[in-house]
């Protein structure tokens, strides 16, 4: 998510020294410090699961305008820390995951689901050939992996990279789109 605004210089997840568990916040620094305000504005208040992200500049020493960013509420149901950070760590593939675009309740209505599917396919087709798409839908009483995420498989890696560069950080239904690449084998096995 963070690297969708630009390359990171560093990322530090703050953990409890006694338990080794995340305290629910982290610090990051961009290679280009001018990106910090844009990332804060773009990600602050973003709804992920039942949590909202809180983004703000961190104070570095006595300088309140330091270049770090503080991110809170990293423990989000359905989105592990590995998935949050994989956008910056993973190599480009043919499969793109679009996050923060849809809420589970928007996927329940058949007509609304079809409209979202058509809109995403049309937009993604601007950047290359879309081979397949998957938008996991909620089923009452059943835990469905990937609900709230949209997966788009492109014909080539360059097509997928073009889509990632153009869609990451854009707004969809007043939410900032966050992207990451997905291993095609996991996509085809529905390991979301």
Image: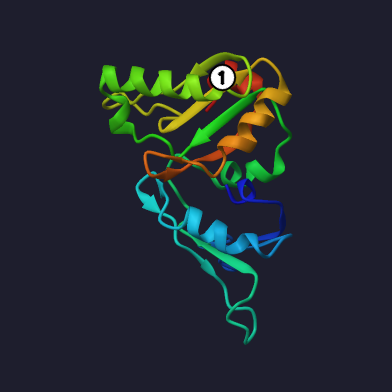
Residue lying at 64% horizontally and 37% vertically, measured from the top left: 165
Residue 138 % position (x, y): 33, 26
How did the renderer colour the structure?
Answer: rainbow
- Name the image quarter holding residue 158: top right
Residue 167 % position (x, y): 56, 36
Q: Is residue 14 visible?
A: no
Left or right of residue 86: residue 48: left
In the image, residue 79 sits, relative to residue 96, either above or below, namely: below
In the image, residue 4 sits, relative to residue 143, either above or below, namely: below
Please tell me which residue lies in front, 12 or 119. 119
Residue lying at 27% horizontally and 24% vertically, measured from the top left: 108
Please tell me which residue lies in front, 183 or 44. 44
Residue lying at 45% horizontally and 28% vertically, measured from the top left: 145
The residue pinned by badge 1 equals: 125
In the image, residue 177 sits, relative to residue 59, either above or below, namely: above
Left or right of residue 72: residue 88: right
- Mark 1 residue element: loop
- Name the image quarter holding residue 160: top right
Left or right of residue 64: residue 51: left
Circle 1 Cα neighbour tier, 10 Å, few/some/many (<14 / 14–19 / ≥20): some
| Residue at the bottom extreme of this rendering | 62
Please tell me which residue lies in front, 123 or 160. 123
| Residue at the top extreme of this rendering | 131
Q: Is residue 85 visible?
A: yes
In the image, residue 152 sits, relative to residue 149, either above or below, namely: above
Residue 175 % position (x, y): 41, 44
Residue 189 % position (x, y): 57, 17
């Amino acid at each position: 998510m963070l690297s969708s605004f630009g390359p990171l210089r560093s990322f530090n997840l703050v953990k409890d020294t006694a338990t080794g568990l995340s305290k629910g916040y982290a610090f990051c620094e961009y290679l280009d410090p001018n990106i910090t305000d844009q990332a804060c504005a773009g990600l602050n208040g973003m709804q992920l699961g039942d949590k909202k992200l809180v983004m703000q500049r961190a104070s570095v020493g006595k300088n309140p305008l330091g270049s770090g960013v503080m991110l809170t509420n990293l423990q989000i149901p359905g989105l592990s820390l590995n998935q949050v950070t994989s956008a910056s760590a993973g190599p480009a593939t043919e499969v793109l995951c679009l996050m923060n675009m849809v809420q589970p309740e928007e996927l329940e209505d058949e007509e609304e689901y079809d409209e979202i599917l058509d809109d995403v396919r049309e937009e993604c087709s601007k950047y290359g050939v879309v081979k397949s798409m998957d938008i996991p839908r909620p089923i009452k009483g059943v835990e469905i992996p990937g609900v709230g995420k949209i997966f788009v498989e492109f014909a080539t890696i360059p097509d997928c990279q073009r889509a990632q560069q153009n869609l990451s950080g854009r707004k969809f239904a007043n939410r900032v789109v966050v992207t990451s690449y997905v291993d095609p084998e996991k996509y085809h096995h529905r390991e979301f």
